[in-house]
Amino acid sequence: MRKLMSKRISALFVALLLCAVSSVSGARTNAQDRGEAKKTCLVRICLAMPKAQMGAGNNAEAIAAVRESFAEYLKGPTLEVAALTARLPSQAMEEARLNHCDYVLFTSLVHKKSGGNSLFRKAMGDIASGGAADVSTTVSVIPTGSKAGSGVGSATSAAFAKAASETTVTGARMAADLAATIGTKDELRLEYTLKATEGRTLLAKSEKVNARLDREDLLTLLVEKAGEAIAAAVIKR
């Protein structure tokens, strides 16, 4: 009788142990699945080629500074960015759809010099700009859309992470270069429009700020404010 009871207790213990091991294994699998789902549920914002009209300095460098700065501020655990190459807005939207973008960001930067700026400041801005340059020569580390059919989605997470870390340095340096062209009381205006790839307009705003001193980094102030609005608009969707 005692041997029978002992066997039954042993069998029950083994069954409970197997059940516990199965539960832990299932919990780990579920946790891993949730982790993988979070990695794939990123919102991809594609950056159209910006426009720029600078009162001093170089338009091409301003374009690069705007794009790199937005790439820096729009990266995070739920967001990723990619640069589009099409110049026409209609073609940029088409490129975004082919490359699996969720949203497209269109931007324009206008710099107005104040009447009190001296020739010395203008000369300093020209020196900082390094003269005219074509935008195609500006080095960018933002992941770009691939050729039609292959898609941005083919880029690995490691590539996006590497580009994001490099963009932080590049964006800060370009913003500083742009600030070298800013004089006291200059105005910098940033216009931006955020569209879903199916055509809906989520945001259409214009922000401007005036410099309180020479060489003030106005671009970073504008991009940070715009970035907050853009992130809030896409995350709550």
Image: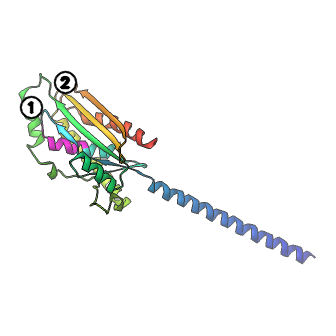
Is 184 colored magenta in this rendering?
Answer: no
Q: Residue 236, position in %: x, y?
A: 46, 41
Q: How many marks?
A: 2
Q: Residue 141, position in %: x, y?
A: 25, 53
Using the image, tell me which numbered label, if any, was put on residue 48: none
Magenta segment, which residues? 57-66
Q: Residue 166, position in %: x, y?
A: 28, 52
Which residue, as the protein is rendered here, is positioned at the far top?
116
The answer to whether one can see residue 17 in this image is: yes
Query: Which residue is identified by label 2?
Result: 185
Residue visible at 57% across and 63% down in the picture:
29
- The kind of residue on which mark 2 rests is Lys
The answer to which quarter of the image holds residue 180 is top left
Callout 1: helix, strand or loop? Answer: helix
Residue visible at 75% across and 71% down in the picture:
14
- Main secondary structure found in the magenta portion: helix
Left-right relation of 4 to 226 = right
The answer to whether one can see residue 165 in this image is: no
Instruction: Specify the quadrant that holds the C terminus.
Output: top left
Q: Determine crowd level at label 2: few under 14, some 14-19, many 20+ residues with C-alpha closer than 10 A.
A: some
Tell me if residue 38 comes above or below residue 4 in the rendering.
Answer: above
- The kind of residue on which mark 1 rests is Lys
Question: Observer-nearest residue: 15 or 38?
Answer: 38
Report how far apart the C-alphas of labels 1 and 2 lie in the structure: 14 Å
Callout 2: helix, strand or loop? Answer: loop
Query: Which residue is identified by label 1?
Result: 122
Question: Observer-nearest residue: 150 or 79?
Answer: 150
The answer to which quarter of the image holds residue 26 is bottom right
